[in-house]
Each structure stands twice: as structure tokens, then as C-alpha cells.
Amino acid sequence: MAWTWRFEKADGTEVEPAVQPEEFTTQGDAESWLGEAWKELLEGGADQVVLSEGEAKIYGPMSLHAEG
């Protein structure tokens, strides 16, 4: 099963990511990629992300904005 990210505006509308992700084989790989790409994604117009494994939503939406 592939792990994938959905990129959204704050209102939940899907947006095209500034950095194209691959399909990841593990949750850790997906999360590591996001840790490296989140600033570019935020600058490109994404406000939040949702992680899925296949059709199952694992968590999110998770904000890309820094707290505080």
C-alpha cells in the first residue's frame, strides 16, 4: 500500500504542491520527505496536509504553518 500526501488550503480545498512528492512505501519515508519539503510547500500555497495509506486517511489535516 502506498503512502501519499494531500495538499490543501486552510479551508480544505486541494491544491497542487510546489514540490511533487513520490508515492512512499512507508509512513516514515513520507514523513521524512515532508520534513524536508514543508517550507517549499507552504511558500507554494499549501496550508495543510493529510497523510493517507491507500484509501485510508491516517491523520490530518496538519498545518504547515509554524505555531505562535
Image: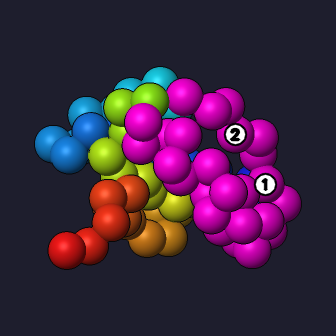
In the displayed structure, does residue 7 sit left or right of residue 28? left
Residue named by callout 1: 24
Q: Residue at x 77, y 41 (%)?
A: 22
Q: Residue at x 63, y 33 (%)?
A: 19
Q: Which mark is residue 21?
A: 2
Q: Residue at x 35, y 52 (%)?
A: 48
Q: Residues within 10 Å of mark 1 (few under 14, many from 20)?
A: some
In the picture, the quarter occupied by the N terminus is bottom right
Q: Nearer the viewer, mark 1 or mark 2?
A: 2
Residue 32 lies, in percent from the top left, at: 72, 66
Q: Quadrant of residue 60?
A: bottom left
Q: Secondary structure at mark 2?
A: loop
The magenta-colored residue range is 18-43
Q: Secondary structure at mark 1?
A: loop
Mark 2 is on which residue type?
Pro
Look at the image and tell me whether residue 53 can be seen.
no
Label 1–label 2 contact, CB within 8 A: yes
Q: Which mark is residue 14?
A: none
In the picture, the quarter occupied by the C terminus is bottom left
Q: Quadrant of residue 62?
A: bottom left
Q: Residues within 10 Å of mark 2 (few under 14, many from 20)?
A: some
